[in-house]
Image (cartoon, rainbow, N blue to C red):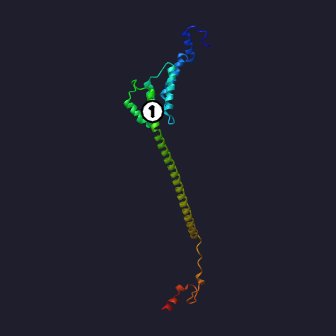
Amino acid sequence: MQVAHLSTAKEIWDTLKTRFVGVDKVRETLIEFLQHEFDVLKMKKTNTIDDFSTNITQIASKASNLGEPYEEKTLMRRLLESIPRKRYIAIVATIDQFADIKSKSMTFHEVVGRLKAFEERYGDEDKSVSGKQEQLLYRYKEWKAKSNQERRHRKDKIGTKSSQKNKGKSKVVDRENKEPRVKKDQSKIKCYCCDELGYFATSCLNREKRSK
């Protein structure tokens, strides 16, 4: 009903194109946006090859609908440059070495198929390695926590001994700081050797005479 009043196919097409695609400025803006999205596209660690290749084909389909289709080699190059090299380095190196991406001998979907086969073959091994790494990390954290606890225990023990030692020293200081004893009046001291007053028996002269 939107184009029922038009009489020629060209008028109908131009109307639909303007309505659903937009005028040239809008179209150019959309193409630039898609190009930027295509250029910064990167595969996340949680993505699979299927997920990421779907993102690429969706952008390519939108660009094609706007009259700017991407070539096969452009899609393949974007795919190989955007996946994690560390995880897929073996298959990427093989494709780069033995496949001529510039020629039409290999298609985008063929590259996706090879990457999926590699992913399914070595994906379990990656998970196994990742699991072992997580176990090692958990054991390291457990050992670290135990070591810190033992270190704190030793520190507390040393602090307790030090406080007890300082406490003992304080008692000695207290004894040393006591007032000195008051000397006795020697005039009232009686010698037990000669019964004289004024000196001790150890210094008595009569004692020396008696010993001779």
Q: Please, is residue 117 above or below residue 148 in the view?
A: above
Whether residue 116 is visible here, answered yes or no, is yes
Residue plotted at (47% across, 27% down): 39
| x and y percentages locating residue 165 in the rendered image | 55, 65
State the SS at label 1: helix
Pick the front one: 77 or 40: 77
Residue type for callout 1: Leu
Pick the front one: 2 or 144: 2
Pick the front one: 24 or 210: 24
Total labels drawn: 1
| x and y percentages locating residue 82 in the rendered image | 46, 31
Whether residue 32 is visible here, answered yes or no, is no
Quadrant in the picture for residue 159: bottom right
Q: Please, is residue 206 above or below residue 185 in the view?
A: below
Q: Quadrant of the N terminus?
A: top right
| x and y percentages locating residue 27 in the rendered image | 53, 19
Question: Which residue in the rendered view is the most extreme toward the right?
Answer: 1
Q: For mark 1, what is the residue? A: 115
Residue plotted at (53% across, 16% down): 24
Q: Please, is residue 118 above or below residue 33 in the view?
A: below
| x and y percentages locating residue 19 in the rendered image | 58, 16
Quadrant in the picture for residue 156: bottom right
Question: Which residue in the rendered view is the most extreme toward the left?
Answer: 98
